[in-house]
Amino acid sequence: MEELVLKAAESTKWDCVSLGEVMLRLDPGEGRIHTTRTFAVWEGGGEYNVARGLRRCFGLRTAVVTALVENPVGRLVEDLMLQGGVDTSLLRWLPYDGVGRAVRNGLNFTERGFGVRAAVGCSDRGNTAVSQLKPGDIDWGAIFGGGVRWFHTGGIFAALSSTSAAVCAEAIHAARSHGTVTSYDLNYRESLWKGIGGKQKAQELNREMVRHLDVLFGNEEDFSAMLGIELEGVAEDFEELPVPAYAKMLRDVSAAYPNLKMIATTLRTAQTASRNAWGAMALYKDEILHVPQREVEIMDRVGGGDSFASGLIYGLLAGKSPQWAVECGVAHGALAMTTPGDTSMATLAEVLRVMKGGSARIAR
């Protein structure tokens, strides 16, 4: 595996640019979607969450390439994004037709789960604004020509429509041609693929996408469903996650895609919805980097993997060692799962304290 080469911060406009959908998340809090009478709202999206974490927790310069419909719901999503601090200058607005026949904003209903009751997600995202992007709609040359250190996207955006995968590939090729490091989170979602060819289509598309990337994120299900690379020697309940099995899986991915410079996976064992064992592994320069699982209590697990990715990316952008970066990702992901919503509410000081093994004693 080759070493990652990053542009200097002073020669660039952005530390990270993400490409993906930003939806309005409707959260019933401690209740359930099908019985609630009130929802709290957040913004969220797998690719966007990474850029937001890098901005709000780690103070980096980030932007998101996305699209929204020009109506009050779209403006609400924008307002939430503005609070997150991510640069919205690359946001495209599409005209509203009055009822959403042609184009609409995506909604994501998510209940957090508790104890033996698992989290539940119900997305309503067909025909959304960002899914209608086509190759040529975005001037990637201007974006990457202005200087970008890192570009991040993923399998959720790639699955949104018949054109989104081509937009994704277009962006990746443009980023690489400008010397920008590229990362991709496989983020397999059965609901997104089942109507457009299932796992067969997912593998056909993603196997080609991964051949042009530098950094790849995913868990054991992602690598199996999206690339056809299986995790061996682990029971179906994932009660125990043997390190050698995960190390072999990462090496199998590396052998199949020698272009990759880093491959990272979270390690999660869900005893209950509110108590997980959480850790991570990565492969970099043929060395396995491992952060052993530790018990963590969960308020809202959605976005934990995205916060892992942003913490790891921060470590690399900050010039830290790859092992430090993986540890940072694990700590940030654990903290993000202690608050509601998809996105991180953690601070860098809190991340550093967790990395050092700090307790949860009250700070005052």
Image (cartoon, helix red, strand yellow):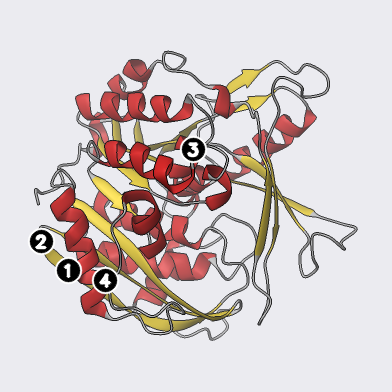
Residue identifier under label 3 = 159
Callout 2: 10 Å neighbours few (<14), some, many (20+)?
Answer: some
Quadrant of the image occupied by residue 273:
bottom right
Callout 2: SS: loop
Q: Nearer the viewer, mark 4 or mark 2?
A: 4
Callout 4: 10 Å neighbours few (<14), some, many (20+)?
Answer: many
Residue drawn 21% across and 53% down?
Answer: 262
Q: Nearer the viewer, mark 1 or mark 3?
A: 3
Q: Nearer the viewer, mark 3 or mark 2?
A: 3
Q: Position of residue 346 (x, y in %)?
A: 52, 63
Residue identifier under label 1 = 288
Residue identifier under label 4 = 246
Query: What amino acid is found at the position of numbered circle 1 in the picture?
Result: Ile
Q: Position of residue 199 (x, y in %)?
A: 43, 48
Query: What amino acid is found at the position of numbered circle 2 in the picture?
Result: Asp
Look at the picture and state if 317 lies above or below 296.
above
Give the CA distance from mark 1 to mark 2. 7 Å
Dot 4 or dot 3, earlier in sequence: 3
Residue drawn 21% across and 70% down?
Answer: 247
Query: What amino acid is found at the position of numbered circle 4 in the picture?
Result: Tyr
Give the CA distance from mark 4 to mark 3. 26 Å
Residue identifier under label 2 = 286
Q: Which one is in front, 19 or 271?
A: 271
Q: Do the CB atoms of the residues marked 1 and 2 lie less than 8 Å apart?
A: no
Callout 1: SS: strand
